[in-house]
Amino acid sequence: MQELFNVDHYTLDRIPRYRLDHINMRIKWLKSIYNLTENNWPLDCTHLLQKMKASQAIPFTYGFSHLPDNYEAITEYLCEYGLYLMHINRSKVRYPFETSADRRLNFTLAHEIGHIMLDHLKVPRDLKSSIEIEMEENEANEFAGRLLMPDSMLYTCNYYSIDAVAQYFIVSKTALWMRLNNIKRLDLLNSRKVRSCSCCGNTHFSTFAEYCGICGTSIRSGLNGIRRIIYPQDIKLGMYKRVLACPICKSTNTGNGERCCICRTYTYNFCSNYLDKNKTYDCCFANMGNSRYCEMCGNPTYYFGLGLLHPWDECCGNDYVAEEDAKYYSK
């Protein structure tokens, strides 16, 4: 049986339960004050630092300095200015993040943000005991792990390799392994893989689909996406992909033709090309009820064109999850 965690590297027993709850609360607050939604993940902390500096919701700035080689970043609180100042080691910056070693900096920046959000810095470090300093480092590491790799996202990943998923979350392989170990889910590394779009994470496709019906990306190169997201069938279809009720007038008395007999709305989510009088080629494919784009040619669908379906990247923020996620939440 695949081990769920390695006790030698488990760190949550070093942090009191009430402090773990505090970490969750502060992450939630961070998301609210900087308007972070699921669309911002994977989270690039260089962008978050820019947002923090621009908004000044928390007095903060950062700069690049020559630090000792064993430091990637150091943050201090300047009490005379009421300001947090983050020094980033100029020699450690390798951006954009490409290798596992490069991505380590993203975790370090999240760690430093953790010190700010958890209010570790207003008491000078030389006034703290070694035990207090170690506790704060553990808390900042846990803050960074939970911020960059939320449980709900980890549960909805295809683990083709640990590096592939670490690259998706912009963290090192070690950081991802430690995060999975702390949630006691190392078994996810060997979990079942599900076909998904590499762009939007959609997992549902018609048999002969050439394009993703959610984001319109060509799927000819394969369905090896990391995330697995279900986009609900906002418009319910019956047999032969015909609507159960007109999406405009809501009438269930839609007759047997292509149009609603009440308001004349099409009762199929056709490719928009089918309705284009100036079309240069024919595509009359009837798509699924949640399809924003035609699975055969990639053009927008009729219902998406009517505004009945929200853009897919807006829907990502509504906690749409993969089908296996329910059992993980129950643990």
Image: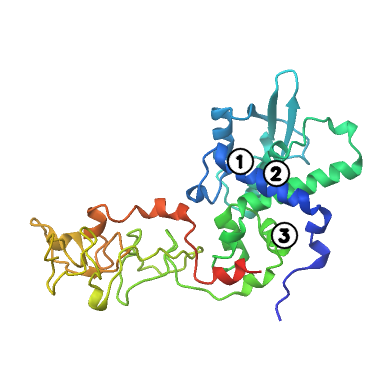
Q: Position of residue 67 (x, y in %)?
A: 75, 33
Amino acid type at circle 3 is Met
Q: In which quarter of the image is the C terminus?
A: bottom right
User: On the picture, is 62 further left or further right than 78?
Assistant: left
Label 1 to label 3: alpha-carbon separation: 23 Å
Residue at the farthest top position: 80
Residue at figure coordinates x 24%, y 67% from the top left = 245
Q: Quadrant of the N terminus?
A: bottom right
Residue 136, by quadrant, is top right
Mark 3 nearby-residue class (10 Å; few <14, some 14–19, many ≥20): some
User: On the picture, is 173 further left or further right than 297?
Assistant: right
Earlier in the chain: of badge 2 and badge 1, it is: 1
Label 2 to label 1: alpha-carbon separation: 13 Å
- Can I make out residue 94 in this image? no
**Position above or below: 264 against 55:** below
At numbered mark 3, what does the secondary structure look like: helix, strand or loop? helix
- Can I make out residue 180 in this image? yes
**Position above or below: 312 against 120:** below
Earlier in the chain: of badge 3 and badge 2, it is: 2
Mark 2 nearby-residue class (10 Å; few <14, some 14–19, many ≥20): many
At numbered mark 1, what does the secondary structure look like: helix, strand or loop? helix
Q: Where is residue 316 in the image (x, y as percent from the top left)?
A: 45, 55
Residue at figure coordinates x 42%, y 69% from the top left = 203
Residue under pointer 2: 111
Residue under pointer 3: 178
Colour treatment of the image: rainbow
Residue under pointer 1: 30
Residue at figure coordinates x 58%, y 27% from the top left = 56
The image's mark for residue 122 is: none
Q: Position of residue 310 (x, y in %)?
A: 34, 53
Amino acid type at circle 1 is Leu
